[in-house]
Image (cartoon, helix red, strand yellow):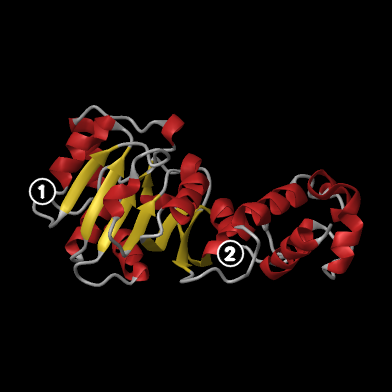
Amino acid sequence: MPVLTPTAVRALLTEHALRPRRSLGQHFLNDPNTARRIVRLADLEPGARVLEIGPGLGALTVALADAGAHVEAVEFDDRLVAVLDETVVGHGDVTVRTGDAATIDLSFLDPGPWACVSNLPYNVATPVVLRLLEEAPAVTRLLVMTQREVGERLAAAAGGRGYGAVSVKVAYYAAARVVGAVPRTVFVPAPRVDSVLVRLDRHPTAPVAVPSSEALFALVRSGFAHRRQMLRRTLRLQLGARTEATLERAGIAPSARAESLTLDDWARLARTADASP
């Protein structure tokens, strides 16, 4: 099977009587150069163990295998599994699993390290990334393609465009940055939005000290629950009558808004809240 050019993708879809499912956010990559570019940006060594979520028709799968990676591809749509098996023949070490990345047992990822290199379906990108960061420590690196707004949110810094609770949680687990843009024209069907490539490198240890990650994230969720409101109001659900005093002891103005706080600020607030009577 050759690499998946636009002609090859159309032929596969016709041969197997397939139509991309909008409900699954399916946009199939049909440009070999983009697939190879993603592999280069992932900095994979020969023999690297790679988790690919949402392989679709296999364009990126083939590029990963041809680079010498051992690929575990998890595909939700069982219609595509037979096509994937056909696509990857002769392209190295690939295992195709049928399953939902939101719920599949991730024990096959041990021992690590693993990289996740994926063209993520738009509708599940954020929960999948967060699940891997929270539940799959064997995955030490991610290079994922997402909708531009989602990618910017994953990598946003305090005060930046898209910065929110997801950004803080990602920053706790990994260093994230947008490393490239992807045009709509390399997909079938072409999406209505632009895509970006986001690289996330897991921190070897948490970059901040907190009483617990759960306590930290509870504060962050409350803080961002009403973005336009000041922290003296948004944090009251968590901190009650001691909200303003706790903020002041943490060196944070009660009139500040959540989007102005860095991960260090949130961690300091979590420690102060834990120590406050």
Q: Give the Cα separation between the discs numbered 2 and 1.
A: 39 Å
Q: Residues within 10 Å of mark 1 (few under 14, many from 20)?
A: few
Q: Which residue is mark 1?
A: 89
Can residue 5 be spotted in the picture?
no
Image quadrant in which the C terminus is located: bottom right
Which numbered dot is residue 51?
none
Q: Residues within 10 Å of mark 2 (few under 14, many from 20)?
A: many
Residue at 52% of width from left, 43% of height from top?
A: 192
Residue at 19% of width from left, 38% of height from top?
A: 83
Can residue 214 be spotted in the picture?
yes
Residue at 69% of width from left, 70% of height from top?
A: 264
Residue 56 vertical position relative to residue 52 in the rendered view, above or below: above
Residue 125 % position (x, y):
48, 47
Q: Which residue is mark 2?
A: 171
Q: Amino acid at mark 1?
A: Val
- Count numbered badges in the picture: 2
Residue 125 vertical position relative to residue 115 in the rendered view, above or below: above
Residue at 82% of width from left, 68% of height from top?
A: 250
Q: Amino acid at mark 2?
A: Ala
Q: Earlier in the sequence, mark 2 or mark 1?
A: 1
Nearer the observer, 219 or 23: 219
Residue 68 % position (x, y):
18, 65
Residue 145 % position (x, y):
43, 55
